[in-house]
Amino acid sequence: MPASCGCRRDAALTDFTARTIRHGGDDWLIARYDASDPTTLSAALQTAASGLRDQGGWLDIVPGLAELCVRFDLMKEKPADALARFTAAAEKISSAAAGEGTIMDIPVCYGGEYGPDLEASAEKLGLSPDDLIALHGGEPFLVQMMGFAPGFAYCGQTPEALAIDRLSEPRRQVEAGSIGIAGRQTCLYSLSGPGGWPLIGRTPLKLFDAGRGEPFLLQAGQQVRFRAIDEAEFTRLAEGG
Amino acid sequence: MALRIEKAGLATSLQDVGRSGVAHLGVPPGGAMDCLSLALANWLVGKAPGATAMEITLTGATISFEARMAFALVGGRADITLNDQPVAMQEQHIANPGDVLEIGAMQAGCRIYLATSDDLHADEVFGSASTYAPGGFGGHQGRMLADGDIIATVGREEPDRRTAPVKFHPFLNKGWVLRAVSGPEADLLDDASREALFTEAFRASQRASRQGAELDKPVLSLREAARMQSGPVFPGTVQCPPSGKPYLLMADAQTTGGYPRIAQVIRADRHLMGQIKPGDTVRFMAIEPDEAAQILREKNVLYAELFGQDIF
């Protein structure tokens, strides 16, 4: 099902049929899908994941970008039974009507020390830094997957014009809140640490705080839109909490 | 009342059995790298198998007691002294205020668990007291222990004297056999490497942590420079990066990874991964999920005789 990135999806449900469903390990299962329309597929994977959560009986339910994994209790359920139960839920999945939920505003200070790879990335992509920022901050993106680190979000899919390779040498230190781009995705680093995505900016929002009532700012399945802010606003927002 | 960390060593942290159900938020399970040694150490001091204990890695550590309590050490083999007097592993001992426990470097295995009859104070986050240092939460201030740290303890009644039958002692080796199920991208290995994965002995490199262990030779090769998107991974997943050096993911591994998942160490054998020492060899033995389920049941039944519950 061909679809261009960033297009509005209509309210009709889109079905995806699993290409394979199998054991990923002794106690986890994986269903893989064709990702010709990654954004709609992501929405379908989130819908399927919440269905599995409602069903219960799974130790972990982890949607990927074009796959869905579940971990089951090997002491309580036979592998064949778990596979049958998962197959029934994952064989055919549907995206719910998307685009209706609220879109979270993510303020980003682009370039400079906040986005040390902005200029080099723009040059590589044949864009001006301003064009890159405009493309990144234009359409809302879906949080497709949480992974890598607590609260780290993979969002997409970004326009083809922003598709860039990861850094050949990962950075030893990426500041929390950093925004990276790679392939057809943009990511938000929740913690400081090593990382390999070219960095174009940073948000003053705290993506993960173990001590906060709700530790995670973002959840898979929600939409975000990036908004350019200047350094003064970054400082003001960072200080304001 | 407290324990004082005189010398923290390479990587000492507070751990219990870890977290479950938070992988989709990017939070790994964490917890003791060797749940059997943790369980036995806890049993020896009269505690539940999953109680919080101290995990000590490779180089050892020195700890002093500021209160009287029972303690036990289980895991890797090292020279251990209490006030310069040798102390046996896998036994219950009593420490008095001012006593100094010195745990030497591991001669075999990689991690020792120090369990105490008094409770160790640790921050509980997402249902577990386990330290997850990359995320800065759990355990003692969300980090690995440092020289001079004071771990507050809560006094409990001294346990009965107990000794564990030898058959329940963990089994140490320098050549490990881990039973594993073929992974979802095993077909991205070339034919020779698919064969090698389950026949060769791999060497554990120096690149080892609570996040994973690199096996640096022999080197495997992928059919093509397979670029894949990041997908979910779990402790025990064996990934094959472009270097061809298999990477065995452990308790603190990130929850998604972008390299082919070529195998998965079975649940029943994952506790062994925590004792792999750099330089040890690792062999993978191919089995099917049904056999893995049977092995897990049998292993849990065997140890439930001592622990009264499933520990794997």
Image (cartoon, coloured by chain):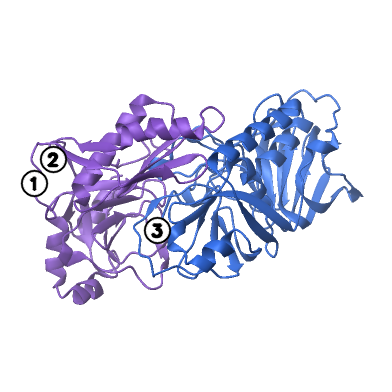
Chain colours: A purple, B blue
Q: Which of the two discs, 1 and 2, labels the residue nearer the N terminus?
A: 1
In the image, residue B239 sits, relative to residue A104, either above or below, namely below
Residue under the image location 25 percent in, 37 percent down: A93
Q: Is residue B70 left or right of residue B296?
A: right
- Circle 2: residue type: Gly
**Furthest residue toward right:** B85
Q: Is residue A49 visible?
A: no
Residue under the image location 78 percent in, 36 percent down: B168
Relative image position of residue B273 (x, y in whole percent)? 64, 51
Residue behind mark 2? A99
SS class, disc 3:
loop
Is the residue at mark 2 from the same chain as the one at mark 3?
no
Relative image position of residue A175 (x, y in whole percent)? 37, 59
Residue behind mark 1? A8
Residue neighbourhood size for the residue with mark 1, other residues' Cα within 10 Å, grouped as few (<14), some (14–19), many (≥20): few
Q: Is residue B81 left or right of residue B304?
A: right
Residue behind mark 3? B258
Is the residue at mark 1 from the same chain as the one at mark 2?
yes
Q: Is residue A153 visible?
A: yes
Residue under the image location 54 percent in, 33 percent down: A74
Which of the labelled discs sits on residue B310, or is there none? none
For residue A210, what is the image quadrant? top left
